Image (cartoon, rainbow, N blue to C red):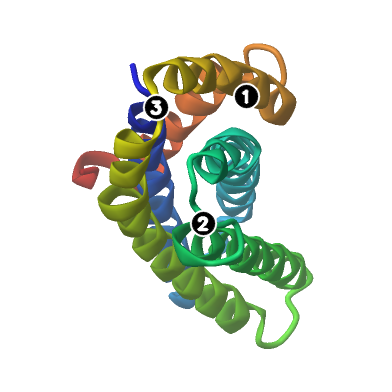
Amino acid sequence: MTPTHVLEEEHERILVLLLVLDRLARQVREGERPFDRIAECLELLRTFADGAHHGKEERHLFPALEQAGLPRHAGPIGVMLREHDLGRAELSTMAAALDDLRRDEAGAAVRLSRAAASYTGLLRDHIDKENLVLFRMARELLPVGAAEALTAAYAGVDEDALGPGGYARALARIDRLEQEVLGATAV
């Protein structure tokens, strides 16, 4: 399996989390308070999507692409890094809004819903850019040996972000949330 294929598969699981977040944000707008599910979704976005997935890109894929000639602070890598930071800021905003919502503070539901919409839009566009532009460039630029080394290095990122055996547990939690929140309408 190529290093970009691993990342593309993770994108599919992240897109599921975004659908879950969309549904949970709608429930909040409608007056429901699924606190535990929102907290779990945000935690998976922080650990799986940002920690493990973005960690693989930032610690291994992007440096390999730099060595292959792509600049870090401009072009596709620069855009991806900026978007990773924007996503982290939105995750923090959602976490703070969830805390406020738990305390029944005025405007918290609106803040959570807006941050969720901003985050899901950002990540969907980000995933499209990576799948359609950056990963194609990576497949062309990276030599076979570099690709094999990247794939091997990814396991260390998963363990750092999710703990021993945490990657499989994260996938199972995503599947469970998908069924609980999206049910039969899951895509």
Mark 3 — residue? 6
Mark 1 — residue? 158
Q: Residue at x 41, y 34 (%)?
A: 7
Q: Amino acid at mark 3?
A: Val
Relative to 36, say whether 24 is above or below: below
SS state under label 1: helix
SS state under label 2: helix
Mark 2 — residue? 77
Residue density around tag 2, few if under 14, some if 14–19, many if 20 or more, within 10 Å: many
Direction bottom: furthest residue? 106
Relative to 17, say whether 177 is above or below: above
User: Which of disc 2 and disc 1 is earlier in sequence?
Assistant: 2
Q: Residue at x 55, y 56 (%)?
A: 34
Q: Nearer the viewer, mark 1 or mark 2?
A: 2
**For the C terminus, which image quadrant?**
top left
**For the N terminus, which image quadrant?**
top left
User: Which of disc 1 and disc 3 is earlier in sequence?
Assistant: 3
Q: Nearer the viewer, residue 182 or 9?
A: 9
x, y percent for residue 163: 72, 20
Query: Would you say 84 lies left or right of 132 here?
Result: right
Q: CA distance from mark 1 to mark 2?
A: 21 Å
